[in-house]
Image (cartoon, grey):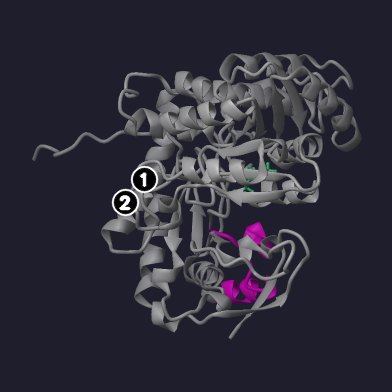
Amino acid sequence: MKPTRRSWAEPFKIKVVEHVRLTTPEQRLRAITQAGYNTFLLRSEDVYIDLLTDSGTNAMSDWQWAGMMLGDEAYAGSRNFYHLEETVRRFYGYRYVIPTHQGRGAEHILSKILIKPGDVIPGNMYFTTTRLHQELAGGTFHDVIIDEAHDPENEHPFKGNVDLDKLEALIRRYGPERIPYVSIGATVNMAGGQPISLENLRAVRALTARHGIRIVLDGTRVAENAYFIQQREPGQAGRSVADIVKEICSLTDACTMSAKKDALVNIGGFLAVNDETIYEEARNLVVVYEGLHTYGGLAGRDMEAVARGIEESVQDDHIRARVGQVLYLGNKMRDWGIPIVVPIGGHGVFLDARRFLPHIPQEHYPAQALTAAIYLDSGVRGMERGIVSAGRDKDTGQEHKPRLELVRLAIPRRVYTQAHMDVVAESVLAVYEQRDKIRGLRMVYEPRYLRFFQARFEPL
Ligand code: F0G
């Protein structure tokens, strides 16, 4: 019989393998109990398929590994720094580059430079570390994403878009002097890996330019965002992902980057800016918190891997396969009627715990409970992206109660096969069929900052 479709495959073959261990249900129950029902506290050895995060979990290419051998470990002026600087200029277009150990290192430095106490930072939905650094610098984050982003069932193709009316109202209310920049995530992690459109970003640029307000891009997953623009935005289909990435960056003034995602490495990040005064201040601060401005907490070999990873990350065949694998997993679950966030995002599939477990109220942490249930079923590790991740209001101490109560199954780049995706989908289906048996949780330990990383729970 003739096949009805022609399949695509990954644009690579596998040269090195790492063994993974399938555990028994008894072992998993012991492990999750010891971990306080928090998948961040599991040992990786006890995990079968690890979808905790796409951060730092990527498989590097032979070209990146070869670059690691060319690490110039001089304290100052490493040749790999200059390669990284040249690469950032070539692919993202910013003038100045300050390496940092990872994304939050860049967020820390930039927040300290730009934010004064009492300032207001609008953004297309918060990200945990980004918002915390804004708050620690004395600012307050305001969400100006379109309403559709908070609705897991809404099919809007660009749920990362900024609501221009919300942004304008904020500027009117606080005045441009109190808004050091607008924070733009591309894609928006907490919304489910949702992209912002070029059209919207151009409009944000026009609006902020009228008021002299900067735009800072969180470029962590900018290549995935560019791919969605290429696929979905009218008039963009003929452009390369690399070309779209460069245009996104050109509409912003600075960028904080966690290279651990799109840029296909295990560690690294940077701050990139166009303004010379900010660059000078960032050079002053990076030596305090990270390291000299030509290494920023990274080894020379790590900077080389980042430089090469950036170049690989914007190749059309790479990004098509990367996002394609996420879509494969998501479509499978969607076809089986499992409630997931739609459209399917760029870096993972997000389960909608509100619809999955309607019998568990948000105060009993349904997404946290679902994450644990999936681990118990199969050893697949995801993470909570709901009320636990949202934390508490910095002034009132009340829990934020986000509309989105999600479990994220994030897919590391170039790590797992289609068979792994099948195993994951089938495990989620098995849990879905037994969902009535899942109970909520009680938090028994709550850390002060970014509580989701280390909080502990017990079943109710
Ligand atoms: N911005 C976004 C959108 C991120 O997703 C992350 C990290 C950061 C900034 C911070 O970068 O980890 O290198 O310091 N996200 C990880 C995740 C933790 O699992 O989504 P970092």
Q: Is residue 153 above or below residue 273?
A: below
Q: Is residue 29 above or below residue 311?
A: below
Residue receiving disc 1: 327
Q: Are marks 1 and 2 in contact (CB under 8 Å)?
A: yes
Does residue 395 belong to the magenta stretch?
no
Classify the position of the N terminus by image quarter. top left
Asked if disc 1 is less than 8 Å from ligand 1, the answer is no
- Residue 359 in percent (x, y) is at 43, 81
Q: Is residue 381 above or below residue 31?
A: above
Residue receiving disc 2: 331
Figure quadrant of residue 123: top right
Q: Is residue 390 above or below residue 129?
A: below
Relative placement, left or right, of 59 versus 159 is right
Instruction: Characterize the local packing of mark 2: few (<14), some (14-19) or many (20 or more) Cα atoms within 10 angstroms.
Output: some
- Residue 370 in percent (x, y) is at 50, 70
Classify the position of the C terminus by image quarter. bottom right
Q: Which residue sits furthest bottom?
A: 460
- Residue 169 in percent (x, y) is at 55, 45
Q: Residue at x 44, y 37 (%)?
A: 322
Instruction: Characterize the local packing of mark 1: few (<14), some (14-19) or many (20 or more) Cα atoms within 10 angstroms.
Output: some
Question: What's drawn in magenta, residue-wise?
Answer: 26-48
Relative placement, left or right, of 304 versus 460 is right
Residue 76 visible to an observer of this rendering? yes
Residue 260 visible to an observer of this rendering? no
